[in-house]
Image (cartoon, rainbow, N blue to C red):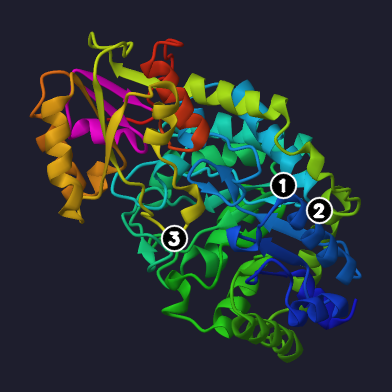
Amino acid sequence: MKLEEKIGQMLMVGFEGLQAPAYLLEWLARGHLGGIILFARNVGTPEQLAELTHSLRQASPYPLFISIDQEGGAVSRLRRGFTESPGAMALGAAGSEALAEEVAEMMGKELRAVGINWNLAPVVDMTRNIDNPSVGTRSLGSDKNLVGRLAAAQARGFARAGVIASAKHFPGLGNTPVDTHEDLAIIEDTLADLRAGDLVPFQTVINSGIASVMITHVKFPELDPQYPATLSRRIITGLLREEMAFEGVICTDCLEMSAITKYYSAAESGVRAAQAGADVILFSHTEKRQKEAFEALVAAVRSGELPEAQVEAAVQRVTALKETYAVEVTTNPALIRQPAHLAVGQKAARASIVLHKAGSLLPLGDSKVGLIEFSPNLVSQAMDATGLNLLSDVLRRKLPTLQSVILDPQNPDNLERAHQLVRECDILVVATRNAHLLPAQQQAAKQLLGEHPKTVLLCLRNPYDIQQLSASTVMCSCGDSTPSLEAIVDALLGEFMPTGKLPVAL
């Protein structure tokens, strides 16, 4: 390979639209890109996506990484036309390694069927700070051993389907209230703290043979007072590569997130990430920054600022991973949404439902039921608007007489209708979504629940809402993907008895 091609193998980029832009196809043809990351903005139908990935591979003289964030639950770029699955926290509530592996293998088969060979999952972050908007139900839980076991099981499932798994966000994103899409997070944990907590599940997945690890945009002053983890040689090479003995491919989180762009140019961050030991450097959005990073990396090698031997080592790791996962790719969109796949999602969702407080109101029978559902909201840019599902739509299919109000506390138009529904119904069901993060939602939910003697509280996202709210019956789904909503409706109607256990400490 020429130097430019070697640097290209270290770059993974994204783009807008359902077809690849001309500049990107040209870069691929030159061998100046080694990977592509896809988002919901690139997805129409399974058939379109298979054609897109085929066009990308055809343009490249080298095997190509094609990646996506398909975690399940809140962060799922593939929804309509694909098999949805419950998210990580739901799998944590189910607590089964076999089930976590089965779900991941099912997801991996659908990814592979449309030409995607790298999934940026599982999330190995422990949920530690309840005010964290970007982890929440994306985490398997707060127990380091449970998180490690289930994440390793997910990685095995993806690998069985022929898809690279990537443990993220090293060395741990859970203990901060800051969303790194918005700004740089700072965690004051010491190395001893990390060794006793956040690093434990990462070491578990490393020991199990996971293929790649993604680094997070968080500064750990005790580990490196100058650089965030993504740009830190102490963390990437010293801690992950040398101390924790990870031999696979290390990739950055997107260097176009505000945690980085507020403080570094694309040239600075790209070169610094490579110097720190990253093998794959991610720029998910703009041609300008992608070009700037590529040119800066080539110049850094020529000037000696970035040792060519380090680039060679990165390319060797990338090439070895591609030989396993990216050489032979056969797409088959007909494999999507097979009945067996849908059954796996349903089984996992049912196993994840937590009956926190039984009461005496279930199953909902012939009583006049009123549902007040707080509207879905995007609490982090990691989520896609395509994932906003309504419980009322699912419940009404089985309970046609249901009366419901979708409530946005920031918009008071429906508030009086909600209070009227409280007065009219025999049983009041209130469904919250992260009320503990949203004071207006928490206040409205508390007031409405206090106005009725027979209440059911459904926590559709983070279960931390149950610390702030009370009801006669309390149930948690640990996520509001379609299978999770269907499962909690089935539990309300007595079609099965929930067995899930909260995977977080309250």
Amino acid type for the residue under numbered disc 2:
Leu
Tell me the element at label 1. Answer: loop
Can you tell which quarter of the image residue 466 is in? top left
Q: Is residue 283 left or right of residue 449?
A: right
* Residue 442 shows up from this direction: yes
Tell me what residue is drawn at x 59 percent, y 55 percent.
Answer: 214
Crowdedness near tag 1: few (<14), some (14–19) or many (≥20) residues, C-alpha within 10 Å: many
Instruction: Tell me which label, 1 or 2, sits earlier in the chain.
Output: 1
Q: Quadrant of residue 485?
A: top left
**Range shown magenta:** 456-476
**Label 3's element?**
loop
* Contact check, label 1 and label 2, Cβ < 8 Å: yes
Q: How many marks?
A: 3
In the image shown, does 285 or 304 lie closer to the viewer? 285
Question: What is the quadrant of the N terminus in the image?
Answer: bottom right
> Does the magenta portion include 475?
yes
Q: CA distance from mark 1 to mark 3?
A: 26 Å
Extreme residue toward the front, this view: 401
Q: Is residue 10 above or below residue 222?
A: below
**Residue drawn 53% across and 38% down?**
201
Please provide percent x and percent y for residue 216. 50, 59
- Which label number is shown at residue 58? none
Q: Which mark is residue 321?
A: 2
Task: Give the residue number, with chain letter if any, for mark 3.
Answer: 381
Q: Counting residues from the N terminus, which is met first, the one under dot 3 or under dot 2?
A: 2
User: Going by the image, does 118 lie left or right of 329?
Assistant: left
Q: Label 1 belongs to which residue?
A: 211
The quadrant holding residue 9 is bottom right
Q: CA distance from mark 3 to mark 2?
A: 29 Å
